[in-house]
Every structure is written in structure tokens, then in C-alpha cells.
Amino acid sequence: MKPLRYLAAWLAASLLALAPAAQADQMLLIRSGQDFEGAMLTLQNAITAQGYTLARVQRVDIGLEGRGYKTDKYRVVFYGKAAEMAALADKHPQLMPFLPLNIAIFAEGDQTLLSTNRPSVLGEFFPNSELKPVFERWEKDLLEILEKVRQAQ
């Protein structure tokens, strides 16, 4: 079985390859001292406390194990503000592949890692003055969400 670290490296390289001028600061990665279940609960609570709604939680570990990767637990948490997402999709349909926002969360031993793209990077792809404050707000909120998870014990 392939170790999880190879998968994490592949995932990071794949996400960075999506950007025309890939930079490491386009991704956010934090480590939580909580076990997976605790970090997942903290993440979901932090998302809702920030005013967002959980859209869905998608299991990824089953598919990875089917491909030979050894993984403990791996999920992608999708979230957003339904009315805002719908309005943005109507007015800017080119944003639809990036909505709702998401955070990958996976176990690594007795710790949990969370990874996501910086929402402000969307401004490079969609340089619209109307969208810039939205992307900046999403990033500010995301940083607060991740900080709550990082600090939780």
C-alpha cells in the first residue's frame, strides 16, 4: 500500500498545477493536535460559527484505499452561504467549479491536517472589482476557521 505522505505530496502538486504561476502560498495547510473526530467536530463548529452552512462532507478514504493508498481517515468538507453561492453562480457562472468552498481534512497518526486553497487566489483568475472583496472576505473567514481548529485541544 502507498503511504499517505505520497498522496499528500501528489495532492499538493496537483492543486498547485492548476495555477498558471504556482506558488506555495496559494495553499493553506494547518496541523491540529486533535484526533480526526475532534478536529472534524471543531471544523464544523467553526464553519457554522463563522456564518456558513455545511453543504456536505464527502468521504475520500474509501476511494483512495481502493487505489492502493493506505489512509486512516480523509474527508472533504464543503461549505458556503447558500444565498451568496446561488447569487454568485447566477451572476458569475464561471465561478461554479469553485463553489461551494471546501477544506480537505485527513488523519496522520494521532494528528489531523487540514488543507485548502486560498480564496484570494481566485482573484488571479477572476480579476473583477466586484468579486475581489468577496474573495478577501472568504479568505479572512477561512483563516479564522482554520485558526480555531489549530488552537483547539
Image: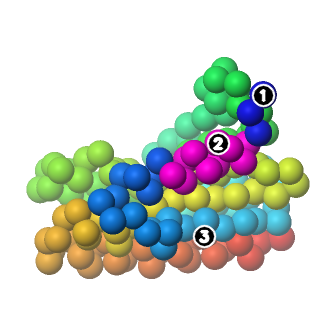
Residue at image x 74%, y 76%?
151
Q: Which quadrant holds residue 123?
A: bottom left
Within 10 Å of disc 2 (Cα), the crowding (few <14, some 14-19, many 20+) is: some
Residue at image mark 3: 146
Kind of residue at disc 2: Leu
**Cα distance between the residues tagged 3 and 1:** 30 Å
Residue drawn at 11 percent across, 56 percent down: 91
Residue 34: percent from left, percent from top: 82, 61
The picture places residue 117, in percent across and down from the top left corner, at 46, 61
Name of the residue lying farthest toward the top? 66
Of callouts 3 and 2, the N-terminal one: 2
Percent x, y for residue 89? 20, 51
Query: Would residue 44 appear left or right of 130 to someone viewing this image?
Result: right
Q: Give the magenta-colored segment's residue range.
A: 4-13
Most prominent secondary structure in the magenta stretch? Answer: helix
Residue 60, by quadrant, is: top right
Q: Mark 1 highlights which residue? A: 1
Indicate yes or no whether the magenta region holds residue 47.
Answer: no
- Classify mark 1: helix, strand or loop: loop
Residue at the image position 66 percent from the left and 67 percent from the top? 30
- Image coordinates of residue 13 in percent, x first then y, are 51, 52
Q: Is residue 45 visible?
A: no
Label 3 packing within 10 angstroms: few (<14), some (14-19), many (20+): many
On screen, residue 43 above or below 153 = above
Position of 85 relative to 130 (above/below): above
